[in-house]
Image (spheres, rainbow, N blue to C red):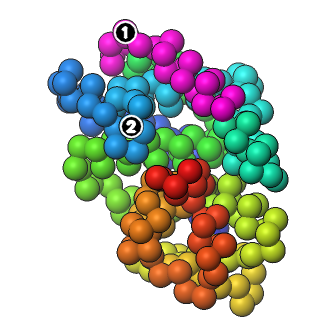
Amino acid sequence: MVTERRAADFKSIYLATRDDLMELVRGLDPASLSRTCEACPEWSIQDVVAHHIHYLGAYLTNTTPDALWHRQLDETEQARAAAAVEADAWTQAGVEARRGRTIEELFEEWRSTASQVSPTDSPFATNLYMHLSDIRETLGDESGRDEPVALYALEGYFHAVVLPRLEREGLPVNVLCADTGKRIDVAADAPVISGPTYELLLSIGGRRTRPGADNALDWGDTDQTTRQLSASYGWPGTN
């Protein structure tokens, strides 16, 4: 079992990732900030930053709607679909509330809110690294793919969303990061999904299409149900 995540100081990881994102985004001109984010086609790059700030503030004040979690974890497809509608409306409202602000105004809110993050607030390192990856991919920036936070984020998405879904179906699976040898072991003799850490993260995190994941990963002896359930938000283009 991977142990680094449990031992990590997530506030330090989070703040370092935030600084990387701020440095990247601060250097963009208005046209680039307005560019559509490839992983979130209804949002600009600046909207993605606004979304994260909204989510962070709501989580720290315990005001996130239950639907945000139910959209991935409810047992029936119908219940998940209903929760997704509510969650998406709440998420979009947070972005809309920050429209018209400059990027520096967003950063000011972010600095104030981030001061409340604790060393054990692991969702934020996970969530923020994914958003940083979304922006980098939109800009064609391939840096940062081998950062240790990629492993923490992979563990976060896998344990929080994908594993409960698979376990409900009686389909345990282990994960192997082929580039580093790191493993997420769930059960002895369970089938193994392997691939580069970054590609595992973007596939399990719902950023790769199913054909893209098929090309990047080795699904081993997993069955088709396991593969279909292994993207946190479903495979793009198939929902």
Q: Earlier in the sequence, mark 1 or mark 2?
A: 2
Q: Secondary structure at mark 1?
A: loop
Is 47 situated left or right of 167 in this image? left
In percent of width and height, residue 129 lies at: 45, 47
Q: Is residue 169 above or below residue 221?
A: above
In percent of width and height, residue 188 lies at: 74, 87
Q: Residues within 10 Å of mark 1 (few under 14, many from 20)?
A: few
Q: Is residue 230 above or below residue 132?
A: below
Please report the residue visible at 48 percent of the width from the left and 41 percent of the height from the top: 128
In percent of width and height, residue 131 lies at: 44, 42
Is 71 situated left or right of 148 in this image? right
Q: Can residue 72 be seen here?
A: yes
Is 187 inside the magenta-drawn segment? no
Please report the residue visible at 33 percent of the width from the left and 19 percent of the height from the top: 103
In percent of width and height, residue 168 lies at: 81, 65
Q: Which residue is mark 1?
A: 100
The amino acid type, in three-letter code, at marker 1 is: Gly
User: Along the line of sight, which residue is nearer the eye, 134 or 7?
Assistant: 134
Dividing the picture into quadrants, the one containing residue 132 is top left
Q: What span is in magenta?
A: 85-105
Q: Which residue is mark 2?
A: 41
